[in-house]
């Protein structure tokens, strides 16, 4: 039962991360992490990612307060994708929905909006 | 309620796809799709992806029979990630587990093996 951290495969320095609510199993969001973000996620117990657009490491909720406490991290068969099972504080999506996946491909909004996005980052 | 297919954002021609069992909500696997794969997924009702390693489009289950019938496709807030909710035939993972995420980061196997991998592709 060797720890899988050393065998994780990064593509251009990044590994995809699926984030799922540990209790409801709702898929909350998707992001990328670099090795430092994965390491910080493990050592702090809170989800960290790497933003391709901002080219920087970030801790989920550092501005919004919508932290993700890690319950378990799973690794896929190819060791090139992670699944964070989390306890989500507030809503995962910056648009104020519990999950970023609040629309169907046909454009139907399938989740209630829990917060006004303007309020999320004006704390 | 505009259809979101035309506004999907691809990175190097690919969009990440999270695959979740529509009934149990278990996260089954992760893959990438190109525009053709997304289009075929919609038109056929069965999950298609694009393999970076083999550089080709593939239909899940075309060899193994482990097809994924689409129940719903969701799009994330940034329109750069998809969530396929599926009815999975057989097991999603080529290693014989229901889900590719059968191990924790610590290396513990948390799912039962349903099939011998050697049997999956010798049909």
Image (spheres, coloured by chain):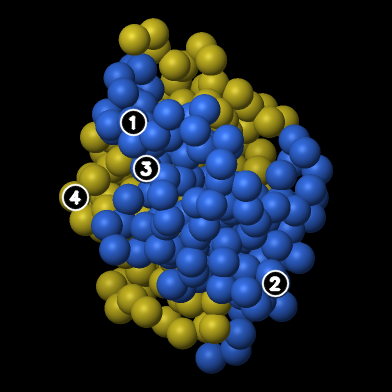
Chain colours: A yellow, B blue
Q: Assign the N terminus of chain A to one quadrant of the image.
A: top left
For the residue labelled by badge 3, is the local secondary structure a helix, a strand or a loop? loop
**Residue A24, quarter of picture:** bottom left
Q: Which residue is mark 1?
A: B113
Kindly indicate whether the residue at mark 1 contacts the one at mark 2 (C-beta within 8 angstroms): no
Q: Which residue is mark 2?
A: B39
Q: Which residue is mark 3?
A: B98
* Residue at the spot of label 4: A23
Viewer-nearest residue: B36 or A65: B36
Discs 4, 3: same chain: no
Name which quarter of the figure residue B38 lies in: bottom right
x, y percentage for residue A62?
Answer: 39, 43
Mark 2 or mark 1: whose residue is earlier in sequence: 2
Is there a contact, CB below 8 Å, between mark 4 and mark 1? no
Q: Does label 4 lie on the same chain as label 2?
A: no
Q: CA distance from mark 2 to mark 1?
A: 33 Å
State the CA–CA distance, disc 1 to disc 3: 8 Å
Same chain assignment for discs 1 and 3: yes
Task: Return the residue found at the far bottom.
Answer: B1
Q: Are marks 2 and 1 on the same chain?
A: yes
Does the CB distance between marks 3 and 2 fall below 8 Å? no
Label 2 lies in what chain?
Answer: B
Residue at the far left in the pictured view: A23
| Image quadrant containing the C terminus of chain A | bottom left
Which numbered disc, 4 or 3, marks the residue closer to the eye?
3
What residue sits 39% from the left and 8% below the top?
A2
Indicate which label's residue lies in the foreground, 3 or 2. 3
Provide residue B87's location: percent of width, then percent of height: 40, 63
| Helix, strand or loop at mark 2 | helix
């Amino acid at each position: 039962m060797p720890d899988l951290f050393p065998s994780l495969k990064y593509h251009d320095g990044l590994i995809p991360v699926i984030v799922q609510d540990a209790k409801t199993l709702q898929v909350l969001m998707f992001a990328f992490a670099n090795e430092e973000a994965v390491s910080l996620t493990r050592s702090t117990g809170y989800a960290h990612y790497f933003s391709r657009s901002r080219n920087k490491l970030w801790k989920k909720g550092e501005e919004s307060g919508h932290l993700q406490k890690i319950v378990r991290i799973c690794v896929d068969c190819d060791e090139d994708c992670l699944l964070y099972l989390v306890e989500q504080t507030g809503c995962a999506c910056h648009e104020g929905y519990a999950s970023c996946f609040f629309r169907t491909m046909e454009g139907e909004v399938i989740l209630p909006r829990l917060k006004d996005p303007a309020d999320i980052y004006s704390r």
